[in-house]
Image (tube, rainbow, N blue to C red):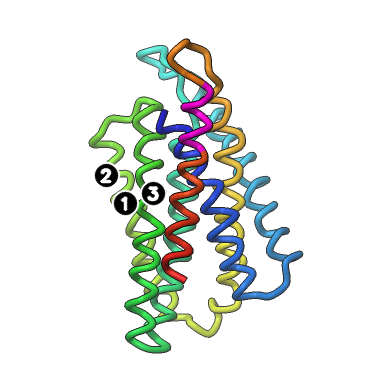
Amino acid sequence: HFISFAAGTLLATAFLDLLPEALEMHGEAEPLLAAALAGIIVFFIVEKLIYRFHGHYYEDEGQHQHAAPTLLSIGDAVHNFADGVIVASAFLISIPLGVVTALAVAAHELPQEISDFSVMLYHGWSRAKVFWSNFGVSLTNIAGAVAAYAARDALEGKLPFIIAFAAGIFIYIAGTDLFPEITPERSRDKISHILGLTFLGIVVVWVLRMALE
């Protein structure tokens, strides 16, 4: 059931958090929507390459292998890199602004990370693999902060497009990998539970964003 929550969270993060933030920074919608579209197309290609080189089945166990956890890890890496750039840039302006920005980033990451763990566990990843994968991906936040400090002038203009690209990734994952997984097939998979948890994911992201504005 947490897959439903994850789908709602990813869509809300893309449409209510990332894209508005990118639009606020850049001001023109068309190039940002093109960057989001690029994220969708690029990750469609990435998913096909994952299936091509890793196959649909584990060789030894014959189990179905899904690309969603890998795609989600890559998408999170892009998103975390952008977050690192945002936080570091805020600290370069002023320390109080940096602290507030860091708290805001941490708050909007919480529901997304819950959904990420749910997706990875659902698709057969062990808890240890999920933990170390997310730990490694989280380091891209530090990489983004270092990049923002070292190349703040060059990277600042590209940040809205990085954020919009990450939004496209989350839209693709939710639309093509998660929603097909939550189609009710068993009696206990009630449509009311699916819809309720999907909307709950959206509401959680929306409430956190409103509270931090």
Q: Could you say where residue 28 lies in the image, as x and y percent from the top left?
A: 73, 72
Q: Main secondary structure of the magenta part?
A: helix
Tag 2 residue: 132
Residue toward you, 127 or 201? 201
- Per the model, the C-alpha gap separating discs 1 and 3 is 19 Å
- Per the model, the C-alpha gap separating discs 1 and 2 is 6 Å
Badge 1: residue crowd in 10 Å (few <14, some 14–19, many ≥20): few
**Quadrant of the rendered image containing residue 211:** bottom left
Q: Are marks 1 and 3 in contact (CB under 8 Å)?
A: no
Q: Could you say where residue 51 lies in the image, as x and y percent from the top left?
A: 55, 28
Up/down of 20 relative to 9, above or below: below
Q: Are marks 1 and 2 in contact (CB under 8 Å)?
A: yes
Up/down of 97 relative to 35, above or below: below
Q: Amino acid at mark 2?
A: Trp
Q: Which mark is residue 194?
A: none
Q: Nearer the viewer, mark 2 or mark 3?
A: 3
Per the rendered image, the range of residues in magenta is 191-198
Tag 1 residue: 136
Q: Amino acid at mark 1?
A: Gly
Badge 3: residue crowd in 10 Å (few <14, some 14–19, many ≥20): many
Tag 3 residue: 111
Compared across the picture, whether 137 is left or right of 181 comes to left
Which residue does the image show at 26% across and 42% down from the upper left? 131
Which residue does the image show at 34% across and 56% down from the upper left? 138
Instruction: Answer with mark 2 or mark 3, whichever residue precedes in sequence.
Output: 3
Q: Nearer the viewer, mark 1 or mark 3?
A: 3
Q: Amino acid at mark 3?
A: Pro
Looking at the rendered image, the quarter that the N terminus falls into is: top left
